[in-house]
Amino acid sequence: MRPVVSVVIVNWNTRQLLHACLASLPWDSPLVALEVIVVDNGSEDGSVEMVATDYPQVKLIRNPGNVGFVRANNQGLRAATGDFIFMLNSDTEVRRGCIERLVEVISRDENIGAAGPRLVNPDGTYQRSAGLFPRLLFRILPSIFERHYDKQLEKLAASGRTRRVDWLSGAALFTTRRVLEQVGPLDERYFMWYDDLDWCQKLRRAGYDRVFVPDAVVMHHGRQSGAKLQNLQLQEQLWDSEYTYLRLNGGLLTTWLVFGLRVAKALMRWCLSVSPTTRKDAAWRLSYHRRRLLRFCRLRLPPADCRPVQSSPAVGNE
């Protein structure tokens, strides 16, 4: 009997990319059976109609608005019934044999909590697929440590050898139902970004390995939903997620140090620069940190927002 892989895809206004993603899945594989769940965050580009018409076998969850990637992803996880779970971005395309290879790797060792494929850009070049957990020193001298590690992973990808890593990209993240039930879903204090690093930290604390599998390949366009946001809104969401991650995994002192370092740099730019554009950017950075001071630098973070999401049930038109 073929193992069932539940593929969970969150979509927000990426109709054409979503169509290509669904078309790339191994629907007729003799080795795995697919349960595909698409959670749509109130798209207005015809995504829902496309899925209903072209892929009636897909379970479709419709949200009336954009509840964020993490909350929508958790909706899909709750609807999944397979023994294996593949969290997949809508702007990806799965290469032949990828899912079957991930099933093989994660099945052979119960200590593996998650496996991640090699991500490639549309031109076939390597895209960052895994990495080291963020550390305070990396925020001060990032080029010395993170870039060296990334170069090592890129060379490893060419060899096809698997390797244990700190974190795996949430663009294509593979796990098992057993692990998910033990560790729990993504933390809904994240809207999007850094949720994958946070979840990999939960795996680490639970004693599970995270494994990079370079001979399983997924093409990833990258940040197609996020690209629809304004630059300042995008930067705010990135920093919000990073500070949430630092508070949950690095503690109050680390958060204060990174927060203070950025405030100091922005203040110096505002005081020393004669360029109106640079001063305007520095003023915005100072304004952001003033508005976020109590949110991220107080003694305790607010609990995860677990309000119920009003959505349609998962339906498929088999």
Image: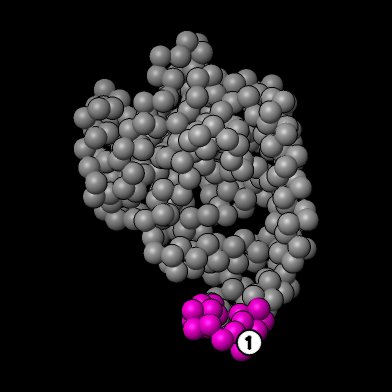
Look at 55% across and 66% down and name the residue there.
239
Residue 150: x and y in percent read 70, 44
In the rendered image of this protein, does residue 37 appear above or below residue 189? above
- Up the image or down, 304 lies above or below 202; here it is below
Of residues 279 and 230, the one nearer the viewer is 279
Q: Is residue 279 magenta?
A: yes
The residue at which mark 1 appears reads as: 272
In the displayed image of the protein, which residue is found farthest to the front? Answer: 274
Image mark count? 1
Q: Main secondary structure of the magenta part?
A: helix
Given residues 66 and 120, the one toward you in this image is 120
Task: Tell me if 65 is positioned left or right of 236 in this view.
Answer: left
* Local secondary structure at mark 1: helix
Based on the picture, tell me whether residue 19 belongs to the magenta stretch: no
Q: Quadrant of the C terminus?
A: top left
Instruction: Tell me which residue sits at (62%, 20%) in the image.
Output: 104
Q: Is residue 209 visible?
A: no
* Of 224 and 291, the residue lying toward us: 224
Instruction: Identify the magenta region.
Output: 263-285
Percent across and percent down for residue 141 are 76, 63
Residue 127 visible in the displayed image: yes
Question: Left or right of 219: which side holds 271?
Answer: right
> Residue 75's spot in the image, x, y percent?
41, 45
Q: Residues within 10 Å of mark 1 (few under 14, many from 20)?
A: few
Q: Is residue 303 left or right of residue 92?
A: right
Quadrant of res 157: top right
Q: Residue at x 28, y 27 (%)?
A: 55
Which amino acid type corresponds to the residue marked 1 in the rendered image?
A: Leu
Asked if residue 155 is positioned above or below residue 307 in the image, the reply reads: above
